[in-house]
Amino acid sequence: MARFPIHIKSVLKPFFMVITATRQRAWIDLDSSCVTVRLGWWQDTIPLSAIESVEKMKWSWAYGYGLRIAPEKTLGAVGSSEGVLVMTLKEPREFRVPFRLQMKRVAVSPEDADGFLSAMRAALGSQARGGSRARDALDDGGESESTQQARAAEGAEPNDAPEER
């Protein structure tokens, strides 16, 4: 499994603390079968088989930051307008935020947007071919390079279990 922290702009960090979106509670986990997104109290898991595509998108400041509803039935879990990626689902899916919404897209702002995009594309391509390549790609170290660097800066060893999951 690979963990990608959600990028939160420095100026927004105090506001994100209110919704308990600390570094330990703002991340995207990707494994060979699903993507789990967590932002503070909110968490949801999306099977890879439900995802049609992933691509970069422009996130306007007008959409807001945090857990947001944006145009085109997009649910955003974003802490920055930089490096935002959107996962388009094959069919609209119900999310609880805390009320129920049918959404077609999920936007996230990983710190390592390029790493997450590459890992997602590999996982989606592998899912279509049977899954072994995604497992191999995700099992070769378990974390993106930026996650390992951030853990090292915090004094944690790479692949240490997070405080909370």
Image (cartoon, rainbow, N blue to C red):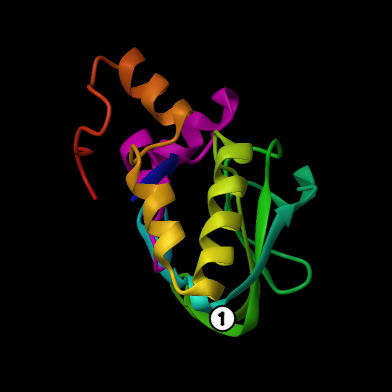
Percent position of residue 98, x then y: 43, 72
Q: Which residues are magenta?
A: 5-33
At 50% from the left and 71% from the top, the residue drawn is 127
Percent position of residue 65, x then y: 62, 46
Number of labels in the image equals 1
Disc 1 packing (10 Å; few <14; some 14–19; many ≥20): some
At 56% from the left and 55% from the top, the residue drawn is 122
Q: Amino acid at mark 1?
A: Leu
Percent position of residue 121, x then y: 61, 56
> Is residue 161 or residue 134 the one in the foreground?
134
Residue 36 visible in the snapshot: no
> Is residue 160 or residue 74 the one in the foreground?
160
Pointer 1 residue: 101
* 40 within the magenta span: no
Percent position of residue 132, x then y: 40, 64
Q: Is residue 120 left or right of residue 105?
A: left
Residue 142 vs 128, above or below: the answer is above
Residue 63 visible in the snapshot: yes
